[in-house]
Image (cartoon, helix red, strand yellow):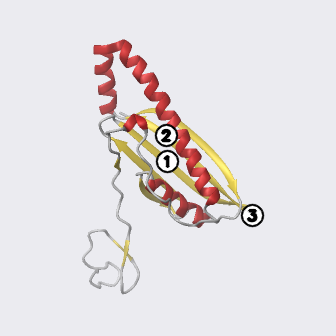
Amino acid sequence: MIRNLFTKRDHRSIAGITKEQAVQAASWFWRSRQFGITFTSPFSLRGEQYYSKLGLRQSVDVWAADEGPNTGVDLSFSASLTDEGAVVGVVGAVLLLPVTVAVGAVSYIEYENDAQRLMNDFWSYIYNFPKNPSPPASPSPPPAWAQGQPAQPVAQPQSPRACASCGAQLDADAKFCKACGAKAA
């Protein structure tokens, strides 16, 4: 069972950027923050990051759409506690209730502050992307609450392959094309 800690949403209308550029910029930004990225449509993506020792999963969803002369970008950021994290919290509560309550409150505030900082950094990057369309300079350090807890990006599905002969989409494990019978490369 996953328990949602919080979800933050924001929408901005940005001039001087296309939907394609917005999604590319979002992909580069969230990858630089160690999120595993999956494109959910041509103009949207989902990024996930999992801290196994803490049982914390962070997710980000980005959508881009035309809004007249501008591009509308929606951002949703959420943090959830997995069963592993809940078990650690329950054991801690039984053994050290006052300390756990205090640490839990601080951790929640830190998670929320980190999420807000990431969102602010994302918007700054998106607004500056048309002037400097390149990936972020370097990956950011892990947040204070995750020091010593390396993030594990969620596995990304393989992108679909296309047949070299006819262009039909191939299954991930296909050795031959279903449409024309050509050997898959």
Amino acid under disc 2: Ser
Q: Residue at x 43, y 40 (%)?
A: 143
Q: Identify residue type, mark 1.
A: Val
Residue 90 or 31: which is nearer the viewer?
31
- Rendered location of residue 175, percent (x, y): 24, 76
For residue 54, side relative to residue 109 (left or right): left
**99 to 46, vertically: above or below:** above
Q: Which residue does the image show at 49% across and 47% down from the upper left?
A: 60
CA separation in Å, label 2 and label 3: 30 Å
Quarter of the image with the C terminus is bottom left
| x, y percent for residue 146 | 37, 37
Q: Is residue 34 above or below residue 167?
A: above
Structural distance between the alpha carbons of marks 2 and 1: 6 Å
Examine the rendered structure and indicate whether residue 150 appears above or below residue 71: above
Residue 176 circle label: none
Which residue, given by chain and number where applicable, does mark 3 sit on? 69
Please tell me which of labels 3 and 1 falls first in the chain: 1
Residue 105 point in image, percent of width and height: 46, 22
Answer left or right for 14 relative to 28: right
- The quadrant holding residue 116 is top right
Q: Position of residue 7 (x, y in %)?
A: 53, 37
Q: Earlier in the sequence, mark 2 or mark 3?
A: 3
The residue under label 2 is 78
As drawn, the label of residue 60 is: 1
Residue at 51% over, 34% down: 112
Q: Residues within 10 Å of mark 3 (few under 14, many from 20)?
A: few
Crowd tier of the residue under label 2, counting other residues whose Cα lies within 10 Å: few below 14, some 14–19, many 20 or above = some
- Local SS, label 3: loop
Who's the residue at 65% across and 64% down the image? 17
Q: Are marks 2 and 1 in contact (CB under 8 Å)?
A: yes
Tell me the SS state at disc 1: strand
CA distance for labels 3 and 1: 26 Å
